[in-house]
């Protein structure tokens, strides 16, 4: 009788541990989905495995927590906003130059905020932590800019690139006004 009671207790403890692990795992997944939004689903698709995608997203978060990312001073924010407005005005006369300038403004803004300027994929991973809702805009705008350099982007594509860059720019700037 004593052995069967001990076995039952051990089984209950193991069962409780498994249930606790499942609950914590689901909670972690839910938090990551909530934090990263569409980027969570993209990571799962890219990795082909939810757990590996979650490890990647957690790794991004830990990396970015160590970076010296900071808000801009008001004077820097104003300078970037003025540069953006000038760039958008340039689009009418020279869409290609406006897209190149928008790309450079986003890079300059990221530098000013404290993001490291490693390769494009690392920049995307870094900004996905704090700006997951617009990181896909960065990918799309960058893709259009690359296609433009190869002569494969239309004026409409360039217009879309500027819109994508604007969404990211405003999110990075932490100013959510319409800049026309």
Image: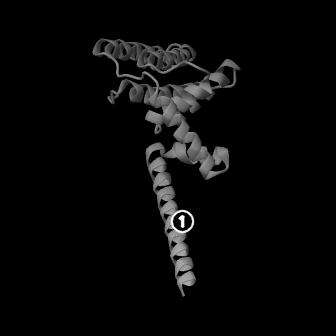
Tag 1 secondary structure: helix
Q: In this picture, is 171 found above or below 89?
A: below
Question: Does residue 138 appear in the picture of this structure?
Answer: no
Question: Does residue 133 appear in the picture of this structure?
Answer: yes
Q: How many marks?
A: 1
Q: In this picture, is 22 found above or below 82?
A: below
Q: Quadrant of the N terminus?
A: bottom right
Q: Position of residue 136 (x, y in %)?
A: 54, 36
Q: Position of residue 91 (x, y in %)?
A: 49, 17
Q: Which residue is mark 1?
A: 18
Q: Nearer the viewer, residue 80 or 84?
A: 80
Q: Residue at x 28, y 16 (%)?
A: 74
Q: Quadrant of the C terminus?
A: top left
Q: Quadrant of residue 35?
A: top left
Q: Position of residue 162 (x, y in %)?
A: 50, 25
Q: Nearer the viewer, residue 93 or 40?
A: 40
Q: Position of residue 100 (x, y in %)?
A: 56, 16
Looking at the picture, the colour scheme in use is one colour
Q: Nearer the viewer, residue 8 or 123?
A: 8
Residue extending farthest left = 74
Q: Residue at x 49, y 58 (%)?
A: 26
Residue extending farthest bottom = 1
Q: Residue at x 44, y 50 (%)?
A: 31
Q: Residue at x 54, y 19 (%)?
A: 99
């Amino acid at each position: 009788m004593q052995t069967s009671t001990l076995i039952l207790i051990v089984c209950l403890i193991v069962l409780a541990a498994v249930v606790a692990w499942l609950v914590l795992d689901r909670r972690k997944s839910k938090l990551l989905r909530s934090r990263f939004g569409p980027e969570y689903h993209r990571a799962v698709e890219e990795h082909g495995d939810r757990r590996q995608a979650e490890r990647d997203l957690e790794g991004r978060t830990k990396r970015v927590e160590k970076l010296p990312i900071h808000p801009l001073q008001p004077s820097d924010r104003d300078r970037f906003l003025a540069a953006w407005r000038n760039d958008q005005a340039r689009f009418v006369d020279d869409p290609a130059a406006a897209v190149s300038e928008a790309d450079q403004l986003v890079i300059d803004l990221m530098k000013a905020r404290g993001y490291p300027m490693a390769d494009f994929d690392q920049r995307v991973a870094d900004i996905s932590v704090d700006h997951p809702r617009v990181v896909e805009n960065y990918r799309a705008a960058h893709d259009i800019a690359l296609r433009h350099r190869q002569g494969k982007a239309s004026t409409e594509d360039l217009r879309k690139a500027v819109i994508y860059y604007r969404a990211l720019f405003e999110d990075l700037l932490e100013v959510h006004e319409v800049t026309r």
